[in-house]
Image (tube, rainbow, N blue to C red):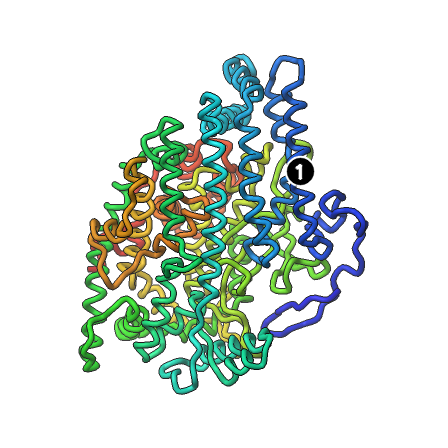
């Protein structure tokens, strides 16, 4: 078996596992994985292996639950709560592989399995959390907790376990439990359909251009578009289809393709066409339209919340977060909305002035923003995005984040070439601690492809636990960065570099975690807290000493000049009106969807989103970062009533990084050790605010965030 490895722009053939040690006659999920570090044997796993493994995993899981229930001894933490932690190992094994590949390397068969499995899995987990006999054992332990002599971590696990049962409906009557199960199953189906529709819509539009349509585009952008057309030709099944792409240039609604075009192209008509293909995804009155799905999910969520005794879905969700009520969330968002919108309007005026000076006779529109904001940036800060990219090759930025975590915590990363991964793009590293001990396996999958969903995320193929021996995790980052073109490496924008640091912050949360119980490991905490470790790591990427440690020109080897760093930092608050306004608009839209009463949710109008945005005064030049029909975070992810979490975590991360600034050393050893001990290692073993206070010495304040984003008035 061979795989392709990209190193500094060179493609090398590297030998991988010579021969599988698994029995080909037995489902690979039913065998022990003898691969290094128990990395899944991806090459041995076939599409047809998943369903039998899921079915057996669910069957074994229910048998394990039955064993706990039938234990005739009095319920104890050890024979009930800890035994629950041990259940479902086979199901977790197959589910982790399947869910990761269904997002990052899907195919029609996996999508079909997703549709089939989502209601099955929902019903399966409901059988556990709505099992009255099991809950009675948990409740007895809870009632006797004062005399149980439990550790702090065990007390938190007991509390969380009971809460999970109660919030799943354990205290409801049989009729209500049946309703909840039916609603959960339907929501799961709709969520899967929403995500698959979105992938189809994103892949369903192509802007196919001739050479005469490329006005304003740089050589790098043109080369990437030509490469995209060539790939389409290679994939075409007919001569007519091949001819469609011959000598053409292809752009798509994927951000890595769209943003460079919107920024550079002088063809306003084509900018409008490509932009609209993006913002109209899922809203085209066709078989992949998501409007009705969003409305159905909002209604079902409101109905479930009412059955559970909550006013709205948002009230139900927020009970578990750091911000506990919709009012608290709205207060935070509006506090930032007013200065953000004010700055956005000023940015529109700046762009209009440029367009007017060019003799243009149009009013700046949404599809003009990238093009004219770049002109303003060049004028105000003499900063050209194209001048930065040569210093930010993907390999450089990966090395930069490795350097950063090495200086913070002494971590080391060794790339492994003799383990097969699930795709040639995916690379594998062993992570070791400062004492040389094994910490984790890290997988990085960075390039856009048509069978990968959009965005960037962190996940894991194996969790961390110390319950029955030291189990270390296998963590993965998936991104959608531009692929290499020709002999050149993948060159990132500064925003891409920030994204890589962000996702690696999540990875660090998963890699450094060190808890007893797997359900409390890594990113298991409240939604508006778990973005803290990721967003905090972003701060280091713009520190001059960090940039100079990795940002070298891919052709000359020259270190990024101080002059360019200075321009980059000065432009740090540039376009913050747009960035914050589009994000806050989406956060407010999320909250509006999920603070609907059941009656209102039953009567959602087609103008719901427009009414929501008009209410807050969103300007025409900006669309919400995610419109409802492609708002995957809340309709096919875990962020319903929680998209605000990024800004709440930003309050935390800005305040936390301020501690390093106050210390005068962004790698201060004492603060670094405290950050690891109190935030990155702890998972959800303590209340989120307690973890933060343990690190910072006090609760967070909002002023550092306003300062970082230029919303404190200092940049007006």
Q: Quadrant of the C terminus?
A: bottom left
Q: Position of residue 443 (x, y in %)?
A: 60, 55
Left or right of 642? Residue 36 is right
Q: Identify the residue at image location x=21%, y=53%.
A: 614
Look at mark 1 in the image and give the residue it sits on: 57
Viewer-nearest residue: 168 or 524: 168
Q: Answer above or below: position of 514 versus 251.
A: above
Question: Can the viewer see residue 320 in this picture?
Answer: yes
Quarter location, residue 383 = bottom left
Q: Position of residue 39 (x, y in %)?
A: 68, 50
Q: Quadrant of the N terminus?
A: bottom right
Q: Identify the residue at image location x=41%, y=54%.
A: 539
Q: Identify the residue at image location x=61%, y=42%.
A: 463
Q: Position of residue 561 (x, y in %)?
A: 42, 72
Mark 1 packing: few (<14 Cα in 10 Å), some, or many (20+)? Answer: many
Left or right of 268? Residue 301 is right
Which type of secondary structure does the marked residue at label 1 adopt? helix
Question: Can the viewer see residue 663 in this picture?
Answer: no
Q: Position of residue 629 (x, y in %)?
A: 38, 54
Question: How many circles with numbers are drawn on the protein?
Answer: 1
Left or right of 692? Residue 82 is right
Q: Answer above or below: position of 427 versus 658.
A: below
Quarter location, residue 274 = bottom left
Viewer-nearest residue: 217 or 641: 641
Left or right of 351? Residue 256 is right
Q: Answer above or below: position of 286 versus 408.
A: below
Q: Answer above or below: position of 230 versus 41.
A: below
């Amino acid at each position: 078996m061979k795989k392709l490895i990209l190193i500094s722009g060179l493609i090398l053939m590297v030998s991988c596992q010579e021969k599988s040690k698994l029995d080909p006659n037995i489902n690979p999920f039913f065998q022990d994985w003898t691969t290094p570090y128990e990395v899944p044997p991806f090459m041995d796993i076939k599409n047809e292996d998943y369903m039998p493994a899921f079915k057996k995993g669910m069957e074994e899981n229910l048998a394990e639950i039955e064993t706990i229930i039938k234990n005739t001894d009095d319920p104890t933490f050890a024979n009930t709560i800890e035994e629950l932690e041990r259940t479902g190992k086979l199901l977790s094994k197959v589910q982790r592989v399947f869910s990761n590949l269904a997002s990052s390397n899907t195919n029609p068969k996996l999508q079909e399995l997703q549709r089939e499995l989502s209601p099955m899995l929902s019903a399966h987990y409901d059988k556990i959390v709505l099992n009255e006999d099991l809950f009675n054992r948990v409740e007895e332990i809870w009632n006797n907790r004062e005399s149980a002599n439990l550790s702090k971590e065990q007390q938190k696990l007991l509390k969380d376990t009971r809460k999970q049962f109660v919030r799943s409906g354990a205290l409801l009557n049989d009729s209500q439990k049946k309703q909840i199960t039916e609603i959960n199953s339907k929501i799961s189906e709709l969520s899967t359909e929403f995500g698959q529709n979105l992938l189809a819509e994103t892949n369903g539009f192509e802007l196919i251009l001739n050479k005469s349509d490329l006005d304003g585009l740089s050589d790098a952008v043109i080369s990437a578009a030509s490469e995209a057309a060539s790939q389409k030709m290679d994939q075409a099944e007919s001569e007519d289809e091949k001819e469609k792409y011959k000598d053409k240039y292809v752009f798509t609604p994927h951000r890595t393709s769209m943003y460079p075009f919107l920024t550079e192209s002088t063809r306003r008509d084509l900018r409008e066409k490509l932009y609209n293909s993006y913002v109209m995804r899922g809203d085209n009155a066709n078989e992949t339209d998501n409007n009705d799905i969003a409305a159905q999910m909002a209604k079902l969520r409101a109905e479930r919340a009412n059955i559970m005794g909550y006013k709205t879905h948002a009230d139900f969700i927020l009970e578990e977060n750091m911000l506990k009520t919709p009012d608290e969330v709205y207060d935070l968002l509006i506090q930032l909305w007013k200065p953000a919108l004010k700055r956005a309007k000023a940015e529109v005026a700046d762009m209009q002035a440029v367009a007017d000076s060019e003799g243009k006779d149009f009013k700046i529109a949404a599809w003009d923003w990238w093009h004219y904001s770049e002109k303003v940036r060049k004028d105000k800060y003499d900063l050209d995005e194209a001048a930065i990219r040569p210093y930010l090759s993907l390999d450089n930025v990966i090395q930069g984040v490795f350097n950063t975590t090495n200086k913070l915590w002494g971590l080391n990363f060794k790339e492994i070439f003799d383990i097969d991964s699930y795709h040639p793009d995916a690379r594998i590293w062993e992570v070791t601690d400062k004492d040389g001990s094994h910490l984790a396996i890290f997988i990085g999958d960075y390039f856009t492809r048509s069978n990968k969903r959009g965005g960037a995320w962190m996940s894991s193929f194996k969790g961390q636990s110390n319950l029955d021996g030291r189990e270390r995790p296998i963590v993965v980052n998936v991104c959608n960065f531009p692929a290499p073109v020709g002999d050149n490496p993948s060159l990132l924008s500064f925003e891409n570099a920030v994204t890589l640091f962000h996702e690696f912050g999540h990875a660090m949360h998963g890699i450094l975690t060190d808890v007893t119980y797997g359900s409390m490991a890594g990113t298991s905490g409240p939604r508006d807290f778990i973005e803290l470790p990721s967003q905090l790591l972003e701060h280091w990427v713009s520190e001059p000493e960090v940039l100079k440690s990795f940002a070298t020109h891919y052709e000359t080897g020259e270190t990024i000049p101080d002059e360019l760093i200075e321009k980059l930092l000065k432009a740090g608050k540039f376009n913050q009106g747009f960035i914050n306004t589009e994000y806050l608009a989406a956060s407010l839209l999320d909250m509006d969807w999920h603070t609907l009463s059941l009656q209102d949710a039953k009567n959602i109008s087609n103008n719901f989103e427009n009414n929501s945005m008009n209410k807050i005064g969103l300007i025409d030049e900006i669309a919400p970062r995610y419109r409802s029909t492609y708002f995957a975070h809340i309709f096919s992810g875990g962020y319903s009533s929680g998209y605000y979490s990024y800004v709440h975590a930003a309050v935390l991360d800005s305040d936390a990084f301020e501690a390093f600034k106050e210390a005068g050393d962004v790698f201060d050893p004492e603060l670094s050790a405290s950050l690891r001990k109190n935030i990155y290692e702890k998972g959800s073993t303590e209340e989120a605010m307690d973890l933060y206070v343990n690190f910072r010495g006090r609760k967070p304040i909002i002023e550092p965030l306003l300062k970082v984003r230029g919303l404190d008035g200092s940049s007006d």
